[in-house]
Amino acid sequence: MNKTSKQEDKLTLIKGEFVYYDDAAVLQTKSNIYGVFVTDKMLELNKLAEKHKAIPTDMVYVEVKGIISNKKDDKILWENKVEIVEILNVSPSNKDKNNVVKLVSE
């Protein structure tokens, strides 16, 4: 087995909502929330994501392959963490699925 196929064996396909804001990156799926390691690949993903945002805190739908870990990290406090290795798709988040509640005083 060569090194490339061994690395591919560790990769997990993750589909969900991604946001990078104020030096913190998060990827939220239907069942998990991942802290995302800030790497060159994550910064590349963020550049692609910015094209689909109205404001900096908007989440964008992504499909990526990455290495999931639970190792301790000084900056990422989420239990589950992911290092993005491959970007498959980036698209606007479905506004109909946005469950944000906005409070307005009358």
Image (cartoon, helix red, strand yellow):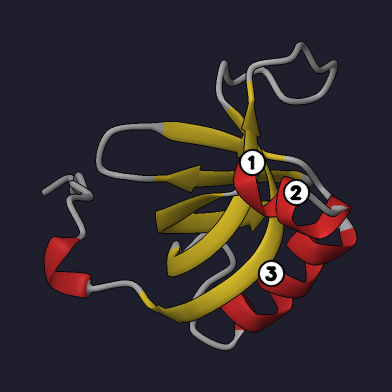
74 horizontally vs 100: left or right: right
**Circle nearer the viewer, 2 or 3:** 2
Q: Are marks 3 and 1 in contact (CB under 8 Å)?
A: no
Residue 42's place in the image compared with 45, above or below, is above
- Amino acid type at circle 3 is Asn
How far apart are the alpha carbons under marks 2 and 3? 23 Å
Q: Are marks 2 and 3 in contact (CB under 8 Å)?
A: no
- Amino acid type at circle 1 is Lys
Residue 71's place in the image compared with 1, above or below, is above
- Amino acid type at circle 2 is Gln
Give the structural element (helix, strand or loop) at label 3.
helix
Residue 27's place in the image compared with 15, above or below, is above
Position of residue 62 measured from the top left corner of the image (x, y, whole percent): 46, 67
How far apart are the alpha carbons under marks 1 and 2? 5 Å
Q: What residue sits 81% from the left and 58% below the top?
A: 4
- The reply to whether residue 94 is in sight is yes
**Which circle's residue, 3 or 1, is located before the other in the chain?**
1
- The reply to whether residue 54 is in sight is no
Residue 56's place in the image compared with 33, above or below, is below
Residue labelled with disc 3: 46
How far apart are the alpha carbons under marks 3 and 1? 23 Å
Residue labelled with disc 2: 7
**Circle nearer the viewer, 3 or 1:** 1
Q: What residue sits 64% from the left and 41% below the top?
A: 10
Give the structural element (helix, strand or loop) at label 2.
helix
Could you classify mark 3 by the number of other residues whose Cα lies within 10 Å: few (under 14), some (14-19), or many (20 or more)? some
Q: Are marks 1 and 2 in contact (CB under 8 Å)?
A: yes
Numbered tag placed on residue 105 in the rendering? none
